[in-house]
Image (cartoon, rainbow, N blue to C red):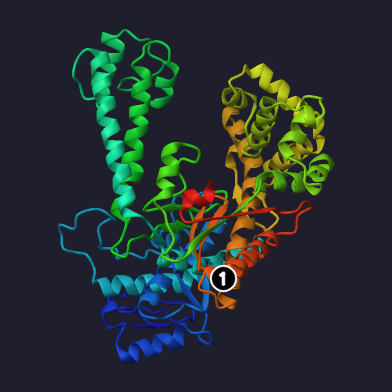
Amino acid sequence: GRGPTGRDPEGQDPDTGGATAWWINAEVMNTGPVKKALTKLFGETGPPVNTHNAKELTRGLDRLGLDLHSLDVDTAVAAYLVDPAEAQYVLDDLALRFLGLEVRSPDAPPPGQLDLAGTTPDPALDTARHAVAVARLAPTLAQVLDSRGLRRLYDEVERPLVRVLARMEKVGVRVDVAELRKLNEGLAAEGRQLEAQIQEMAGEPFKVNSTPQLRQVLFDKLGLQPQKKTKTGFSTDAASLEKLRGQHPIIEPLLRYREVEKLRSTYGESLLAEAGDDGRIHASFNQTVARTGRLSSDRPNLHNIPIRTTEGRRIRRAFIPTEGCRFLVADYNQVELRVIAHLAQDPGLIEAFASGQDIHRATAARLFATDPDAVTVGQRSKAKMVSYGLAYGMEAFGLGQRLGIPTDEAAAILDAYFVAFPSVRSYMERTVAEARDRGYTETLFGRRRQIPELSSSNYRLRQAGERQAMNAGIQGLAADIFKVALVRLDQSLEAAGLLSRLVLQVHDEVILEVPPAEEDTAAGLTVDAMRDACDLSVPLEVNLTWGTSWADAKG
């Protein structure tokens, strides 16, 4: 149904501001006349289409053999750019916030509440209201994008990214189900063994997963010193248990048990459950979640797979390419540090990157006033921690905890860093001052992040706001660069008519599935797309690795 003007059967005014609002019954979408009309509507010569959550529409149209070529405004993505701090972008909420428009029937119960009175409106009528809401909301959000300088970011990055993510979700990534089962069984067996060991050390059988029972064993029976108290009693969370190391040998297997159970439930069982009949996992890639602009994933969450542990490598070993192909894993080399060098315009950092030096060794040489060749492994490690800590707004206390050193020693290392690279400190101070004055940070691509904490009367909140301001500019630009690279790479693969395809995106790396005959071409296109995503004062360096599994490619 559609209607540019007029009133619906319940008397609500569905004025769409001159636009045509469509709702289409799924049961008739694949019939001849309707599909023909949809092909014309969504084709390259079709009118601009506004929708809410275009990725889902793209996936749905794909199942009908259709492609969404004429997307104009995705109200979910546009609202995310306007205010990235929202937890979610529900059409009903956005219509009420920006238009004062109640989308739901006034007689309908609140979402999630049981309808005992039988007042729930006809689903078709409810859908029609949503179509009208999109038609009215889209131009409003478009005006906000224009007024805040967000149009280029939307048009060139976020809107084309919708199609890339939809395609990646459709393709999915192949998994070795037998390897996942083996992993899950191994974790379950280790968990049982640890549970028995913990009970033996406790001198009694008890449910290790039961917080009250564990609390009774640790603090009442064994007499360990509690570290933190919650509303329900002494804490047994991981941080509290870490502080109990050395008080009793039971803590070590207990921490490992927690780790094993988390791995088993989060990855062993979850990955098996998510593997489809096609032997592939089709994760959902989230474009409107992270405040910094970063992408995330769920069903399952692939971004939190441990990186340097044995279990993490075993999990990655279960991700394999289609028969006859290899994985090409491409990631940026130290992208946050290169972003810092560019934003701060620090001569020392720029020179180190431009000359291809080991940036952590070069940083350590300046921090510890020694020759680069004389830098020790420990000094290089500390320099690396300082550099990445700054990228995430870390201060002396956090750095000290990460390095296992006193706070005053960590503060001295930070001071030495800022003496060695003074432009970085100037950039940090300037960023915080600008954010405090404007109320938000802004990346080179125009991405904004509001930081109300900077104007708080609470000192700790203001400090947190300062860390967010420093972090947002760096992480936001890194996110913009990666998204541009994804869009360009997808377009390059399509333009070249290759069978190679994007299958996964995790942090700063993208994984392609590549047939043997296309390896050289795919590698070249990948490097070009990622290296040229943004013109910085330092080169963007891309690492390429190949493998017959994700773990194999990662080394």
The answer, for residue 144, to whether it is visible in the render is no
Residue drawn at the location 75% of the way across and 28% of the way down: 375
In the displayed structure, does residue 494 sit left or right of residue 409?
Answer: left
Quick one: which residue is furthest to the bottom in this view?
A: 33
In the displayed structure, does residue 432 sit left or right of residue 267?
Answer: right
Quarter of the image with the N terminus is bottom left
Residue drawn at the location 40% of the way across and 70% of the way down: 59
Residue 128: horizontal and vertical position, in percent?
A: 34, 75
The image quadrant of residue 420 is top right
**Residue in the foreground of this view, choosing between 138 and 169:** 169
Residue 495: horizontal and vertical position, in percent?
A: 59, 77
**Residue in the foreground of this view, choosing between 10 and 247:** 247
In the displayed structure, does residue 247 sit left or right of residue 137?
Answer: left
Residue drawn at the location 58% of the way across and 28% of the way down: 460
Please, is residue 36 above or below residue 475 in the view?
below
The image quadrant of residue 412 is top right
**Residue in the foreground of this view, choosing between 518 and 20:** 518
Quick one: which residue is furthest to the top in this view?
A: 223
The number of callouts visible is: 1
Amino acid at dot 1: Glu
Residue 426: horizontal and vertical position, in percent?
A: 79, 37
In the displayed structure, does residue 364 sit left or right of residue 207?
Answer: right
Name the element at disc 1: helix
Question: Which residue is denoted by mark 1 in the rendering?
Answer: 518
Residue 71: horizontal and vertical position, in percent?
A: 51, 75
The answer, for residue 422, to whether it is visible in the render is yes
Residue drawn at the location 80% of the way across and 35% of the way down: 421
Q: Assess disc 1: are there few (<14), some (14-19) or many (≥20) residues with their C-alpha within 10 Å of its C-alpha.
A: few
**Residue in the foreground of this view, choosing between 323 and 279:** 323
